[in-house]
Structure formats: structure tokens, C-alpha cells
Amino acid sequence: MPKYLHSMIRVTDVDKSIGFFELLGLNEVRRFDSEQGRFTLVYLAAPGDEDAQVELTYNWPPEDGSPAETYDGGRNFGHIAYQVENIYETCRRLMDAGVTINRPPRDGHMAFVRTPDNISIELLQDGRLEPAEPWVSMPNIGSW
């Protein structure tokens, strides 16, 4: 049987991306730098769930001084989903750190946010919480 290993997303700033995923509760579990290939791979996972990893791929800027590659649409990823213990607390922690809640958890079950590289992250409540303010009244912002 196949075994899930990881999902890969391309990032333009490793530190910002790691900081975002740390807000979600993930930790770096390993890192690989390739001087020859000019890339860095960083693997993150939730504590106790190290088999479900997200791989951040950072392609180093060209040595000739030309601009670094940017990614959009299908070149980065669709979305990654994480189950959380309390979606309201998770969204509050993200908002307090300056993250926009693109689709607030109005239903007490689902929210969407975006990483610094505009990757969509779906947050799903473990179970369902009763709808509560300020989330019920919050509008969607941008796309998710």
C-alpha cells in the first residue's frame, strides 16, 4: 500500500513561511540544503504526527543576479488542510500575528488563511463548535 509522505509547496522566504507554520503548531523536523542544486528543503510536521509533513521548497536566487523566480496558480499548490483543537483560538492567534482570515470560521467548523506565499490553508475544527462572534459577523476577505 502507498504511504503518504508529504505535500510540497514552493516558498520565497523560508523564515516567513516557517514562522507561519509555527503559528499553526508545526515544527521543523528536518532540513536539506543543496549547494549544487541551489535549493533548500524544510520539512515541518505537527508534534506527534511526524508522518504527515509539509515540505517547503526554496529555490535560491540565480547566481547571475537576476531576480528570483515567483510562483502563482498551479506552480505553488492548491491548499493544505489541518485539523485544529479550537478553530476560534487558532484564528485569533493567527490574527494577532497579522495573518488575514480569508474565510472566517462562521460555522464553528472551517476557515481559510494564506501563507506568506499566498498558499491557501484550510483549518478544520475537530468536531464542531457553536457559531460565535466575532466570527459569525466577519466577511470573507479576498479569495481562499
Image (cartoon, rainbow, N blue to C red):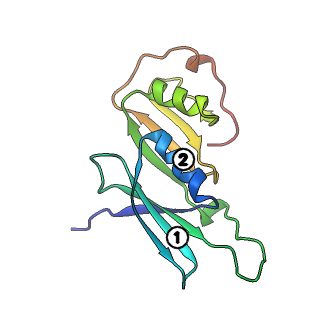
Near mark 2 (Cα within 10 A), the count class, few <14, some 14-19 or many ≥20, is: some
Provide residue 51's location: percent of width, then percent of height.
29, 57
Vertical comparison of 18 with 144: above or below: below
Task: Say if mark 2 contacts mark 1, CB within 8 Å.
Answer: no
At 68% from the left and 73% from the top, the residue drawn is 61
Mark 2 → mark 1, Cα distance in angstroms: 16 Å
Residue type (three-letter) at the residue carrying disc 2: Gly
Corner quadrant of residue 101: top right
Residue marked by disc 2: 19
Residue 40 numbered tag: 1
Provide residue 72's location: percent of width, then percent of height.
67, 61
Is residue 11 toward the left or the right of residue 49 in the image?
right
Q: Nearer the viewer, residue 88 or 108?
A: 88
Is residue 13 toward the left or the right of residue 81 in the image?
right
Query: SS of the residue at dot 2?
Result: helix
At 70% from the left and 65% from the top, the residue drawn is 70
Q: Quadrant of the C terminus?
A: top right
Is residue 25 toward the left or the right of residue 19 in the image?
left
At 59% from the left and 48% from the top, the residue drawn is 115
Q: Earlier in the sequence, mark 2 or mark 1?
A: 2
